[in-house]
Structures are given as structure tokens and as C-alpha cells.
Amino acid sequence: MKGLNRAFTTALLLFFSTEALAETCSEVDADAQRLLASPAQRSDLATLKHIARRAMANSGCRGEYVYRLARDLTLAALGDIEKKAAAESRPLASRELQTLSEISRPWQLMTALGDAHFAERAWLKAFDAYDIALGNLDMAKGDERRLYGDVYARAIVARAILENESANDRSDSRPTAPQFRTFRGGPAVDRAFLDEALWNRVGLSADRRLLQAYLVEFPDGAHAAMAKTRLTELAK
């Protein structure tokens, strides 16, 4: 009996000591806030991943908290990278952003990644990054509605170039035109709004590929007649 009591007491002590050692979500959050305040630390991908893993492994941290933490860490790191690139008078490079996209995929990051891929002529990667950004944008929000149209237009341009480059010039290739995942079961799409957003980006272009891309998307669009007229003028 004494042996059983001793074993029970030992097990109880181990249980409470383990509970005492287990970190709480607030402790994870405190470390995350310290990391957010340190540009040197948040530029270290391994540190970002470690904090995110701790949050995901902690049953006290809800899924929404984990997502927000990953988003905040990633966007803080993105801000640091953007400042460095601006100081060096250069565009963002996709290699700088790709690793961050492994942690979180908010629309800001994916739009920047799409722009970087576009500058590097990786059209398919640019299209895919914009597609993911569209999936995270909310057209119902007034402050994101304009951005949704802008990112959509950038994706159309990337796809148009991808489809029309010669095989020797392509940095990416795909046998059929990529389609928007976000337009199948994604946010409700206001076609008139997207029509205007795309025309704002390609309407003044002298690139036939972009004007043709507009007509493919909106054959009966508000600017279809103008697009056809410009194509005729460019053909002369």
C-alpha cells in the first residue's frame, strides 16, 4: 500500500511539474511580440518558423491567433525587406519573398511576390501569386475592393504575356491557359467593376497582347469597341 501511495504521489508531482513547465499561449505571444520588435530576429526565417510552430503546437492558441501571428510576423519581415530594397534603389527579388510565403499568404505578401516574379519575367509564378492574393482579398470591404481589381488586372496581364511569348522566350510554360482558382467558388465577382479595373491597366497600352487579353475577358465589355479600334490602329 505504501508503495502504491508513493507511486501515486510521484505521478501527481510529475503531472503538476509538467503543467507548471508547459508554456501558455500568452507566453508564446510575449516572445512573438519581442520578435516583432526586433528587425534582426524577424529577418531570420528559422526564428519565424519556430514561433509559428510553438503557437500551432499549443492547444491554448486558437487557429485564428496562429494565423494572425504568422501574418504579422511575415508582414513585419516584408516591411524590412521593402525598406532595404528601396534604400538600394532596386525592386524586390522573388527569392527574398518566396521563403516568407511558406509561413503565411496574406494578400500583401503574395501581391509583392507576384510583382517580383513579374519583374523577373516568371509569368506563370506571377500569375499564381496574384491568384493566391485574390483568394485572400475581400471584395466586400471598401478598402480592399480597389486592390482586388488592381491585382486581378495584374494577373490578366501576366497571363496574357505567358500565353503569347514564344517558347524560346518563356521563363515558365504551361500547355493551356491558367485559370483563376478564386473565380470558382471564391468571392462574388462584380464583372463591371473588373472590366473597368482591367481597362484602366491595359487601355493605354500599345501592346496588342494586352488589348486582346481584355477582349478575351470582356468580349462585350464597356470598352470592347475602343479595344478593337486600338488594335486596328496598331495593325497599320
Image (tube, rainbow, N blue to C red):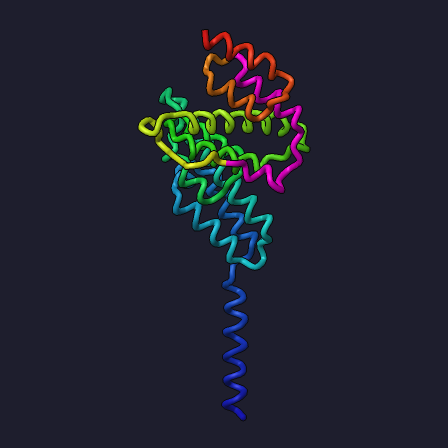
- Residue 76: tell me if it is visible: no
- x, y percent for residue 217: 57, 26
Q: What is the magenta range?
A: 179-204
Figure check: 161 above or below 228:
below
Q: Answer with the quarter of the image where residue 39 lies.
A: top left
Residue at 55% in and 46% down: 67
Q: Quadrant of the C terminus?
A: top left
Q: Quadrant of the N terminus?
A: bottom right
Q: Is residue 198 highlighted in magenta? A: yes
Figure check: 41 above or below 123:
below
Q: Is residue 133 left or right of residue 77?
A: right
Q: Is residue 7 highlighted in magenta? A: no
Q: Nearer the viewer, residue 228 or 24?
A: 228
Figure check: 19 above or below 28:
below
Residue situated furthest left in the rendering = 168
Q: Is residue 231 left or right of residue 224?
A: left
- x, y percent for residue 133: 53, 35
Residue at 38% in and 27% down: 121
Residue at 62% in and 20% down: 196
- x, y percent for residue 108: 52, 33
Residue at 62% in and 40% down: 186
